[in-house]
Amino acid sequence: MTVKEIIQIENGNRNTIILLREGIFWRAYEKSAYAFSMQVHPYKPTRKWVIAVKQDVVSLGFPVSAAENVLNGCKVLMRQEARLVLAASPIDPDGFEVWKQTVPRSLPPAVVAPEPAAASPVMEPAASSVVSPAVSAVGQCCDGLADCIRRFNIESKTPVDCMLFLMELKRKLAE
């Protein structure tokens, strides 16, 4: 399913949580992510600028292997191999928009995208590229790499964040 199709479905979403299977993860987007976060489990969402739809898109996800524990007690309206639809309380569109703006935007390093005036990305002191939270976490570690690894909250990071974190650790080790 493309991001455009997901956004079209989510624009009409009023009272369901739509989970899409992507590899080994269940993912919720936009209003479904909002409802999931508020009504099921407060997973950390991410907000990314998606060129294909020319807007920020919020999502969250969790491993398929954790679904039984996470979704315990949720009313399943539809179950397919790659889609799960859960019952939800009515979704407040204004509450969703306010919540969406509170989700920090994440971009991979060295990607410069046009930013709306209200956003304030994390910047390296003398660089013009946007730094991902994973990479900036390495820069904030001052007690050694082992301590930095211990502090890195892998459970709340995306696979890309983890890969970028590892790449930055390798760079630090090479220094």
Image (cartoon, rainbow, N blue to C red):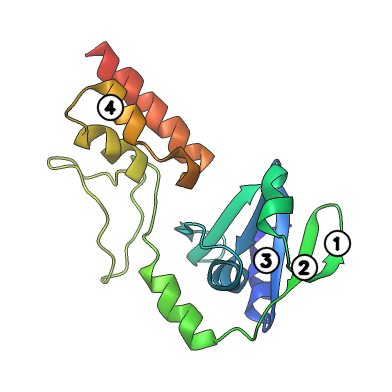
Q: Is residue 132 something one can see in this rendering?
A: no
122 shown above or below 74:
above
Q: Nearer the viewer, mark 4 or mark 3?
A: 4
Question: Which residue is tagged 4?
Answer: 147
Q: Which residue is tagged 2?
A: 85
Q: Return the residue at label 1.
A: 79
- Residue 174 locus on image (x, y percent): 27, 12
Q: Is residue 57 left or right of residue 174?
A: right
Helix, strand or loop status at disc 2: strand
- Going from N to C along the chain, the mark reached first, 4 or 2, is 2
Q: Earlier in the sequence, mark 3 or mark 2?
A: 3
Q: Is residue 14 left or right of residue 155?
A: right
Locate residue 32, reporting x and y percent. Answer: 62, 70
Name the residue at 57% across, 62% down: 41
Q: Disc 3 to disc 2, how far (Cα)?
A: 13 Å
Q: Image point 67% across, 66% down: which residue?
A: 6
Marks 4 & 3, CB-CB < 8 Å contact: no
Q: Quadrant of residue 71?
A: bottom right
Give the CA distance from mark 2 to mark 1.
7 Å
Q: In the image, what residue occupies the spot 30% across and 43% down?
A: 131
Residue type at tag 3: Ile
Query: Circle 3 is placed at which residue position?
Result: 6
Q: Residues within 10 Å of mark 4 (few under 14, many from 20)?
A: few
